[in-house]
Image: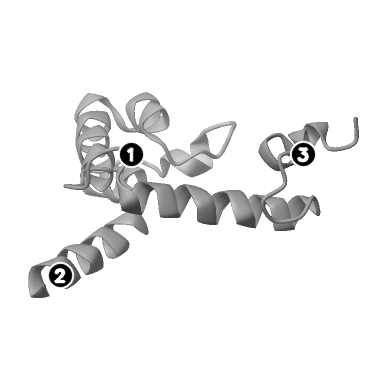
Amino acid sequence: MPYAVIYALIGYLSGSVLYAEVFCGIFGRKNAIEQSRDANPGTANAFLYGGFWCGICTLIFDMAKGYEQEPEGGKRCYRCYKLRLDQAAKRTGTGAGSTGSGTHFPCLASF
């Protein structure tokens, strides 16, 4: 059980880090977010504005954020899906558990 808490804490902290910014700073490049047109702190902009090694490091660390031991479609996966579905329903005003198109596609809620 203590390992689960440690892994959860590491995952939470790692998920809040923008690795494109970190590695652009390490490799002495200007901030990729400020230079890009779309202001996206992603791997593509790390490659474009930070260089090859900056992009590779950003890619590896961003992929590591999504690594987990829980199999896809497990109990936790369903709970997260249900939580996100309910949150989206509340934001769009379609009601929790609604099966209307507005729940899954908020841009279609007015049709």
Q: Which residue is mark 2?
A: 6
Q: Which residue is mark 1?
A: 73
Q: For the residues marked 3 and 1, what is the alpha-carbon distance in whole angstroms?
A: 24 Å
Count neighbours of disc 3 (C-alpha within 10 A) and say few if under 14, some if 14 to 19, many if 20 or more. some
Residue 77 image point, x, y percent: 36, 47
Residue 41 image point, x, y percent: 44, 41
Q: Residue at x 28, y 43 (%)?
A: 66
Residue 80 image point, x, y percent: 44, 53
Describe the element under mark 3 as helix, strand or loop.
helix
Q: Comparing marks 1 and 2, which lies closer to the viewer?
A: 1
Q: Comparing marks 3 and 1, which lies closer to the viewer?
A: 1
- Of residue 49 and residue 5, the one placed in the foreground of this image is 5
Q: For the residues marked 2 and 3, what is the alpha-carbon distance in whole angstroms?
A: 38 Å
Q: Which residue is mark 3?
A: 102
Compared to residue 2, the image places residue 54 above or below, namely above
Residue 78 image point, x, y percent: 41, 48
Compared to residue 22, the image places residue 51 above or below, namely above
